[in-house]
């Protein structure tokens, strides 16, 4: 009888945990439980920027600035493909940047090295508010990779994109050592993204 009672208690506890979502770190996340979407960087196109924040000619598939930065706030423009992914399925994004000096040596990421912002409509405002997201700049992040940076963490940050942005501007900040910046990772997700489990485009951890 005691054995039967013990089995019954264990079954009840297991059912309660399952109902509450316990016992797993892969529970369905808000936004439909979609697997992370890892952007294929080889499909991103760099474009020339013209005075007045206008898009010039395309410069090919490169996610590192082709012209060395000379001063703070120099930047370059990356265009996103319109059919990249339905962003309404995802609430968060993780983005990493790599920094290089004039000799091409990679630098340890720190605050005041680089920042970026998404641009919804490339014919509209590219800059938005000084610190926060704006109507046409649904995501703006500074100190990417540094102590104060959040977007580069596995948790990422929330984005306000209802559709694929037209592109993103990556800028050097005040650190004069930074001459080149390269995109390392762009992942849209609904829970923590594990860097230890690299995935092909649009596929989440198994």
Image (spheres, helix red, strand yellow):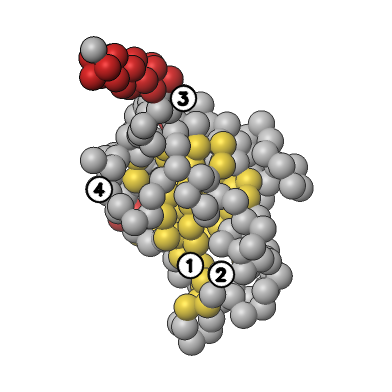
Residue at the image point whose x is 46% and y is 82% from the top? 104
Q: Is residue 158 visible?
A: yes
Determine crowd level at label 3: few under 14, some 14-19, many 20+ residues with C-alpha closer than 10 A.
Answer: few
Q: Earlier in the sequence, mark 1 or mark 2?
A: 1
Q: Nearer the viewer, residue 85 or 107?
A: 107
Instruction: Give the labeled residue for mark 3.
Output: 30
Mark 1 — residue? Answer: 98
- Above or below — where is 88 with respect to 54? above
Near mark 4 (Cα within 10 A), the count class, few <14, some 14-19 or many ≥20, is: few
CB within 8 Å, label 1 to label 2: yes
Give left or right: position of 170 versus 184: right
Q: Residue at x 47, y 83 (%)?
A: 105
Image quarter in which the N terminus is found: top left
Residue in front for this viewpoint, 111 or 131: 111
Dot placed on the residue nearer the N-terminal end, 1 or 4: 1
**Residue at 33% from the left image edge and 17% from the top image edge:** 9
| Residue 94 x/y as whole percent | 48, 47
Q: Are marks 3 and 2 in contact (CB under 8 Å)?
A: no
Find numbered disc 2 in the image and state the secondary structure of the residue it sits on: loop
Q: Indicate which label's residue lies in the foreground, 1 or 2.
A: 2
Q: CA distance from mark 1 to mark 4?
A: 20 Å
């Amino acid at each position: 009888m005691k054995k039967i009672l013990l089995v019954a208690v264990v079954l009840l506890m297991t059912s309660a945990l399952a109902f509450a979502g316990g016992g797993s770190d892969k529970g369905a996340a808000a936004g439909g439980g979609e697997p992370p979407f890892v952007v294929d960087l080889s499909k991103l196109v760099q474009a020339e920027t013209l005075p007045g924040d206008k898009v010039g000619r395309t410069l090919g598939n490169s996610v590192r600035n082709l012209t060395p930065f000379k001063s703070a706030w120099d930047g370059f423009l990356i265009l996103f493909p319109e059919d990249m992914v339905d962003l309404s399925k995802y609430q968060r994004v993780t983005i990493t940047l790599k920094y290089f000096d004039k000799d091409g040596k990679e630098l340890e990421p720190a605050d005041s090295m680089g920042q970026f912002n998404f641009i919804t409509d490339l014919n509209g405002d590219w800059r938005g508010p000084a610190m926060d997201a704006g109507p046409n700049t649904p995501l703006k992040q500074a100190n990417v990779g540094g102590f104060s940076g959040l977007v580069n963490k596995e948790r990422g940050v929330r984005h306000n994109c209802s559709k694929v942005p037209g592109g993103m501007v990556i800028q050097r900040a005040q650190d004069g050592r930074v001459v080149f910046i390269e995109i390392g990772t762009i992942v849209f997700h609904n829970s923590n993204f594990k860097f230890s489990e690299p995935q092909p485009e649009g596929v989440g951890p198994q």
